[in-house]
Amino acid sequence: MSDDQLRLSSTWGQSADDGTGLAPLIGLDEALEQSNLRRGISREAFLKELLGDLHHQRLIPLLLMLPRRWRGRSASLPEHLRSLGNLLENNLVSPLLLATLADDLQHMLPAVSKPSELSALDRWSQRQISISAEQTLALPQTLQALWSMTADAIERVSVMQQQPSGTLAKISSMGGALTWSNRGLTNVQAEPERLRNRLLAQILNVLGSNRLNRAGHASEPFSFEGVGSGRELLDQLNKQGWQSCARIRTSVASFGLGASTRMGEQWLQIPLAVPYRTGLLDETGKEIQALMPHSSLEMELRPPESSPLLLQYYQGVEGLNGWAALNELHRPWQNDRSNGTVAYQTTELRGEQLGETLDLCELMAAVHNSEAQFSHLQMGGYGALGFCIDSTALLEQAITGRTNLFPLTLGDLWRQRLHRQLHQQLDAGLQATDDSVNRYRLALEQLPQDLFHDNQSRSDACRRLKASQPRHSPFALVRALNGESSGELLTED
């Protein structure tokens, strides 16, 4: 099997929108070979440091992103993960393997959360956010308060951007040149706007938690601008002249990780991605390879005379199903909303359809987070109850009657458990419209699976694979899937 799935295309940078003046790129394999990390320590020493703390949830995706010869031997891993390590060292992941991992991860890893940490349901319904180790903000309950408490926010650089922590810091300090963050880049929005996004995302989560039966709960239902649901808030904002829309988006997933290396006075950015086997053959009979996508429902809320608030809904590694801020570094190669590195599906949600979508988001979050809590699932059920792409596809299926996303790995066992949890929550007093419930039930039954295909399902899977790709990318693999260059890497060697 070829070891250059993350090879960068030589044609990237021909367009001004590629932003190579702002963010010149270097491939991960080349960066590892050229950096002081490669010259200063052995590959074995690098892997020993990298794999020393695989309980850190950020390191497992990093292991998948490494070029094959940098992944290490299974003996370098904790004993309970050695079989997994051997598999990943010599092969790429596949939808079937992802589904297996999602199910087995709930039993294979030791507990990653301390008993004192928040459950998925607690995270979803908490009425505050932590903006640093020293400061926690209670959620505002009016737009005026939201703007007031964010207007004077100073520009903060997160700890992860300033200096990698834990095991990642050891790796960077040993190498001296390779940094597991994107140095030299700015955020898409300023700090006040990013804080506003974070607060409003959690406000929408808490409004959704109002749907649960609160019998015996000490606190009253949460309200914002005098309303108690996301749909009511959307109607309120529209009456005040706000513009609102939402779109299903996909981009190349890096699981929140970044990387860069300093060459002279310049930081070169290292695009990260997880290559995988699709289980589908091309016309020559070889298995198609692709890069794992990140998917979410992106919602933009634009006040009459202010910058937009940017939010996204998905099942995340953060430990819950719900809304999160869409706070991004300006990575022109991965998440630019206008240059094609983010792919948007054709349906744009507005008006009544967007209101119905918010109802569905609240119903799904109530069911998924309840199942995660009551079944004591790792990472809020991430993977078992669907990865980000499964939750987004489930929402798209419920809204439009079909999905354009690939790969989908939500297994039947977990679909049955979500069905059961839905019934239990409805019996317990969950507030949901009949339309939302029926759409969600039908979506659970009809959502495709990409574990196995036959003559009836294969063509639709190929359609969804292509529809999930960015329209423009520096990765040769993505460009080949889009048919841009017959000479780019596409299939297994």
Image (spheres, helix red, strand yellow):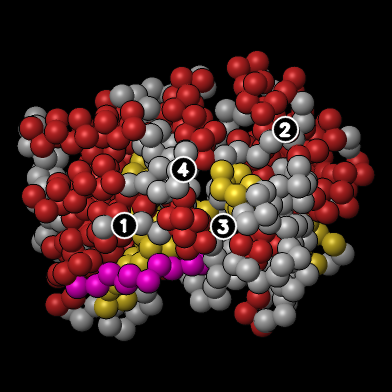
Query: Whole-Å distance between the Cαs marked 1 and 4?
Result: 17 Å
Residue that badge 1 annotates: 402
Q: Nearer the viewer, residue 188 or 450?
A: 450
CA gap, disc 2 and disc 1: 36 Å
Q: Which mark is residue 252?
A: 3
For residue 26, say whether it is visible: yes
Please give the label number shown on residue 89: 2
Residue 417 magenta-drawn?
no
The kind of residue tagged 1 is Arg
Could one spot residue 195 in this view of the protein?
no
Question: Residue 357 vs residue 454: left or right?
Answer: left
**Callout 3 amino acid:** Val
Q: Which residues are magenta?
A: 342-351
Crowd around label 1: few <14 · some 14–19 · many ≥20 (10 Å): some
User: In terms of sequence position, does the residue under pointer 2 or pointer 4 come before the other?
Assistant: 2
Which-is-in-front pick, marks 1 and 4? Answer: 4
Measure how far apart labels 4 and 3 are at the Cα level. Answer: 24 Å
Q: State the residue position of label 4.
A: 453
Mark 1 residue element: loop
Q: Measure how far apart labels 2 and 3 are at the Cα level.
A: 22 Å
